[in-house]
Every structure is written in structure tokens, then in C-alpha cells.
Image: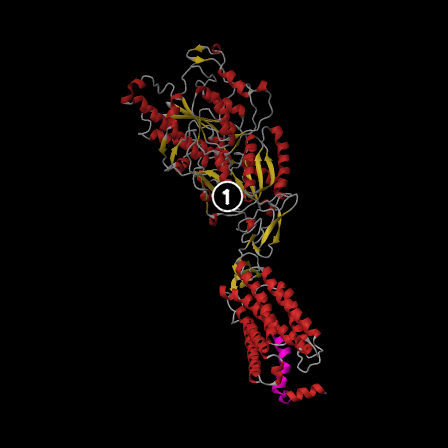
Amino acid sequence: MVPLMVLVLVLMDQSMCRVQDARCTISEPLSRIHKYYQEGDLIIGGIASLIYAISEMTDFSQLLNYMAYNMPFVLTNHYQHVLATAFAVKEINENLQLLPNVTLGFHIWNSYFSARETYRATVELLSTKNRFHPNYKCDFQKNLIAFTGGLEAETSLYIAHVLAIYKIPQLTYGSSSIMNDKLSGLSVYRMVPNEATQYKGVLHLILHFRWTWIGLLVVEDERGERFQQALVPLFLQNGICLAFIEKILQVTSLDYYFTIMEAGFEKFDVVMGSKANAVVIYGDSESISYVRWCLKVLEAEFTAAVLKGKVYITTIQMDFVSYYYQRNWEKQNLHGTISFRVHTNQPPGFQQFLQSRKPLWTAGDGFIRDFWEQAFLCQFSDSPLGEEFDQECTGAEKLENLPGDVFEISMTGPSYSIYNAVYAVAHALHALQLSCNGHKRRMERKKCHFFSQPSWQLHRFLKSVSFNNSAGDKIEFDASGEVLATGYDIINWLAFPNQSVFKVKIGEVHLEAPANHTLTIHEDCISWNSRFNQTRPISVCSASCRPGFRKKMKEGEPFCCYGCISCPEGKISNQEDMDECISCREDEYSNMGQNQCIPKNVTFLSYGEPLGIISVTFVLSLSSITLLVLGIFIKHHNTPIVKANNRNLTYSLLVCLLLCFLCGLLFVGQPQLVSCLLQQVIFGMVFSVAISCVLAKTVMVVLAFLSIKPGSSLRKWVGKRVGNAIVISCSFFQAALCFAWLATFPPFPDADLHSETERIVLECNVGSVAMFYCVLGYMGFLAIVSFVVAFLARKLPDSFNEAKFITFSLLVFCSVWLSFVPTYLSTRGKSMVAVEIFSILASSSGLLGCIFSPKCYLIMLRPELNDREHLIRSKGQ
């Protein structure tokens, strides 16, 4: 209905205007006092969001007759927005190089934060001087050439709908996501960056502080919905969860005020009760006042520590502003707030301009009296408000003495955008003026009516405007009419017990920088809320999982809420809050804390370690004993006991046992290709020859006994040939197995990465496991056959019968190797090598001790028994 009303006003019949003495006779239905007018050849219009007035509910029939306002509430900090226009116009008019012979003026009206009043103010700015009558020149026509405003997105949209009819450039200084779509195609230039870039800054700020459990307060309108729809997915994609999403309600009338406040208090119960310490607030210029209202009422319900224990993150639309009645309310619950602000520099002379403002000396300023009263809490003698304040205004009060939440002497972000907007218009006008007066454009000059209607001609010059302002910043627009801004400033709000408020710049957001350089922040400059004891606040759903632990999701809860479980052995987490533990490389192992991978030490069964020394000692000792026994037998080779037991087989057996002992040395030391090839092959061959010799000796004993029987045909088999044949044939089969092993998949040097947690064991890999067990199995087969033959021959009546000793020795041999197989399979690394060396030494020692110790006893200690006659005599007995 409101846009329809505007169009009706614009298109009304010309007959409504009667010219009498060059004046219009129509009456002005609504008298306004909140405006600031300065004459000029060309006028820049503006709508300021400065004074808020809650009205009683009225119907449409009353709209054009009157509007009943209660006492106006002034957002005193916003008065600087009006003064920024005045200061920029003053500088431009004093600049002889910019717009010579042209005087700029301005006309600024108040929006009252109302769509109805914004439309009406815009139409009045388009109307004849002192007459509410657009489109008709009943009197001197104001040369409105550009428009600044507004601070809120809705205000900008209301203005744009009207100005689009006249193609008048509008330069907005408010930021909102809905403006990007709805202002498209209109005559609008935006003095702040696209709001989507602000989301990037908010995200990087939250990620920088590692906050993952965030609350969200958004204004309850289309802007808030768009902000929520854009930010929530962005948060989720970057591991940030939302503890709550609550709405900031809007007060539109006095009747609605208390209902909305009550609902707001309930919403803030959720905010205060949440353990999310970081809360993002998206609203407008009044939202902080609303937040302060809610906190004020909640003081009775929550402790001061809780009320002060949040970090609020605000967007550029919001500022720390106060109504006069909130002046003495607690401010420290907002101490530590972090806000975004359009990048701002301080134009020289601006502070002096502000300090020179006096309510009694300023003509045309309809804002200053209300501002002055509510800023200094005083009252002029002729004030229409009655006795609202006890103190009387003298007009000598100083703006620089006001607290920061009441009025700032330094230029704020919106004021800086307004200042640049006015200069952009001036530079565009200057370019238009040069175009009209240029010597090379005489034909075009005929079509150029600079003072009569320059607004529609101004667009092409605004789009290409580029200049450096007095603060040193370059101002220009892109193809879409958006200012090319360098980024945002990050501001820290400081509220002190004496109710003073200061803002400190703590960093910047650089829009054009790479992702890892987007945010620049100086944490040492940040003053956090007193609850956090000047340490970085933590805002997480669950405590961080320390290195060595990983996150474990909780069923039915957001992914930011989780438990922590320790990493399993062999895996680590070297950062906080890792979703999964990472495995160490095979040549590394995890430390006790499961947070670091440590390189494994390389080890093998060396000659210098205790196990290696023991193994070598036993090898040499047993080899020495074997040599000693061999020496004894060689020395006494002509004695009956040596002759009776087949000297050649005895010598062969002793040499094989010596080699068996010595092959244990192949298992000690760093594995090499040659040593790995020889280990198992020599072990299999010499043991097979040794067992073959034992089998041959046993068979020879049996044949010798059987051959002494009368008429025995076995007598021809008694001799060296049978023993040699047995040894050669049995050994040949083992040699064939070993050759096949070497030809197919031979042993090779290898590194065992898994047997020992902290070490890499160098070893000889057997290659073909099947061939290894075939060699071992064949050796076992020979041992079992020898054991069976010896066991059957153990009671043969022969004084030289050694079958008993062979039986016992093979029993020891088989026991050792039967124990070896499961033990070998159950051990790893150096222990496996040690088990094989032990089995070799133990089984060889069993053969040596059980077969040769009785003979050595007779030879060395009972030589009188080593006599043929004695042995024959013993046989006869």
C-alpha cells in the first residue's frame, strides 16, 4: 500500500496546483522539524536514521492528517552521519579546484525508522520548496542531483523505489544481503563492500579463535533470514556448529513494545543458559539497544558473571549506541565485543569541525537541539518536552567530553562512507562540468544543461569516478556500482566501570588476499570480557581431544559434541580434535602418549650383544669339544673300541657335528645375501649328512649282528660300501631339495618391521617357506628312521653295540626339533634366530654327548677296558 500511495502522489492531476502570485495554494499536512537544510546551487539529499519515535497505532485514514509521536529518542552517535555530509560539503565549497563557481548544498531528513516516513521524506525532497508537490514547478525548484542513504537496507530500498523514477543517483552506506538483489537495475551506488565478503571475515575470525560452538542472534526479517541461510552452511562446512539460533525482534509501535520485550527476554534465557561463549549478532543500528534491554531485565535472574560471560561478534550494520535512558545501564556485559567496520581513515579537520558545533550557532540544523539535550542530559529553556532533564543546557558543552557510546569524535564507518559518497558526487559533477565546458566538446555542450537537470547525466561520470580522498584512500566503483573497498577493520569494544566506552582496532580483513592471509589480527591488543581473565575464551561443545586421542561422535548430537578415545597402538594423533588417528610408517612406532611417531632402531643378532656373545661362546665351546673328541678318536684310532664302531663313519659324523656347531655362526651378525643363502642350506645338508651317518652306523650294527649267524647271506653286505651308500644316497636327496630351493625362491636378507615395536630387525627371510619345511621335514624323517632302527637294535648281544646310545641321542635330537617347530612359529625377530641356533646346538650336543661320551670315557679314563681280549672275555662271560 505504501508504494501505491507514493505513486498516487507523484502522478496526481496537475489541476491540484493553482498558481497565485507565483505560489502554490496546497497545504502541507505534516510539519517536520527534524531536518537539516543548507542552500546551494545543487542539492544533495539524504535520509538519516537518527531519531526514533514510537507512535500510537494509527489507521490509513489518519496517515495524511497527523502522526502522534511520544518523546523522540535520539541515537546520538548517528548525529555524526549528518555532520559528515555537512563537513564534506563545507570542504568541497572551500576547494577552489573542485566545482568552481558551483555551491553544493544538502537537505537531510530523518527516517524515524519508518517506511511511511522514509517515503514521505523522499517525496518531499523531490517537491517544490516548502510545498509537498512533486513534479511541478510551482516555485523555485530544488536542484536535487544525488541522494545519500540510508543506513538500514529497508530505508535504502524505500528511497530507491522513488528515485528510480527520476534516475537520480543514490549512494547507500548501509550493508545488507537483500540489497544485492533488490537494488539491481536501480540507480544505486553502494559505498560498502558486498555483504557476502563480510561472511568470509566472520568465518575466518571464528576459525582463528577455534570457536566451534556458536550462538546466532539475527534480526527477525528478510535480512536475518538471508544472513542465516548464507552463514549456517558456511559454518557447517568448516566444522562450526550452532548452539542456538534466536531472533532479534523489531519494535514498531508503543502498543507492541512490551509484548516484544517479553518475548525477547525469553530468547535471552536461551542465550545466557547456553555454554556457547561466542555469539554472532546480525541486526541493525538499534539491535545493541535491544540486547541491552534484555540484559538489563535478566540481571535479576542471572549472576553478573554469566551476564558478562559472552563474546559478542557484531556486523558492520551495528554499533555501540545508547538511548539517553540507557546511559547508566551496565555496559561491561558488552566489554570485549568484537565488531566489523568498514575500513576507515580520519579526514584531517573533521574532529575540529565537530568540536566547533554549538546548538545556538548552527542555522538550518533541526537535529542538533534534540541531540544536544539527550547527549548531555540537559534541557533548553524553550524545550517542548517539559521537564525531562534536571540540568539546563548552556550550549557551551563540549562534544569531546561525551562517552564513546553517546558520541564519537573519531569518524565512524558509516560517516566515512557518507563522506566518500559526497566527494564521489562532487568529483562526478566536476567531470560533468568539464564535459560541458570543454573546448573540444562544443557540440555536446549545447545539449548539456548543468544546473537545470544534471542528475540523469551524472551516472556515466559516477561509474568512472576515481579519486584519492583527503585521508589518502582511493575511491572508485566497479562495474556493478559497488565501491572497490580494501576490506574491513576489526574493532574491540572496551567498556570501563566509569561507564566510558572505547573502540580499539585489533585487526583487518583483506578481501583480495589469499585464504590464509585474509585475516590479520593482533591478539595482544584484545581486551576480553572480565569473566575470561584476559585469556582467549573457549566456545566449544566438548573439550578438545588432546594429541594422542581422537574424537568419538555422540549419537543424536551435533558433530561438534563428541567424546575422546585413545589412539590404538601404532597410530597417533599429533593435533587436537582429530577425527581419526593416523598410522605411523612401518619404520616408525608410536610413543607412549600416542602423539608422535618415532623412527625405529635397526637391530639384528650381533656379536656384541649378550645373546650373540652367549651364542658364539656356545658355538666355539661345543666346536672345541667336538674337535677334542675327533682328536681323541684319531689318536686312538687303532684301539678296539674305535675300530669296532666304523672309524670312517665316526670321523664323518664328528666332522658333520663340528660343521653343525659352526653353522650357528652364520646366524649371528648382520644378514647378508651370502650368509642368508648359506644358513639354511648348510644347516640342512650337514644335519642330513650327520643323521645319515648315524643311520649308517645303526644299520651297520644290525648287519654285523645278523651276519654272524651260520649260513647268513648278509655277510657280503658288511663293509664300508653299505655305510657309504647310505650316507651318499640320503644326503643326495637333501642336496636335491636344497638345490631346488635355491633355484626357485632362495633365502634373502629382509627387514622385520613388525616383530618388535621399537625396532627393525634385520634377518634372513627363508624365501620359500614350503621348501624350508621340506628340508626340515626330510631331516626329521631321517632322524625318525634312524631312531626306529636304533630302537629295534638296542638289545642286540654285542659288546660293541652302540644302538642304545644312538637311540637315546636320536630321542634327544627329535625332542629338540619337535619343540623347535612351535617355538619357531611363535617367536619373531632376533628370538626366532636365537631359537634356531639353540635347536642346532642342543640337537648336535645331544648326538655328540650321547654317542661319544661313553667311548671317550673308556678311552681316556678306563683304557684297561679298551682291550680286545678283555672285550672278548666280557663277551664270553
Name the residue beneath numbered marker 1: 205
Q: Residue furthest front?
A: 711
Q: Quadrant of residue 657?
A: bottom right
Task: Tell me if residue 271 comes above or below residue 586 in the rendering.
Answer: above
Q: Residues within 10 Å of mark 1 (few under 14, many from 20)?
A: many
Q: Can the viewer see residue 811?
A: yes
Label total for image: 1
| Range covered by the magenta-colored residues | 844-867
Task: Tell me if residue 301 comes above or below residue 676 in the rendering.
Answer: above
Q: Nearer the viewer, residue 421 or 872?
A: 872
Picture coordinates of residue 702, whole percent (x, y): 67, 76
Indicate left or right for 810 with 398 as reference: right
Q: Quadrant of residue 455?
A: top left
Q: Can the viewer see residue 343?
A: no
Q: Quadrant of residue 362?
A: top left
- Disc 1 is placed on an element classified as helix
Image quadrant holding the C terminus, namely bottom right
Q: Main secondary structure of the magenta part?
A: helix
Q: Look at label 1 and name its amino acid.
A: Leu
Picture coordinates of residue 635, whole percent (x, y): 55, 84
Q: Residue at x 68, y 83 (%)?
A: 799
Picture coordinates of residue 192, whole percent (x, y): 45, 33
Q: Is residue 848 magenta?
A: yes
Indicate left or right for 555 with 367 as reference: right
Image quadrant holding the N terminus, namely top right
Q: Nearer the viewer, residue 19 or 122?
A: 122
Picture coordinates of residue 235, whole percent (x, y): 55, 40
* Color style of the picture: secondary structure
Q: Is residue 51 magenta?
A: no
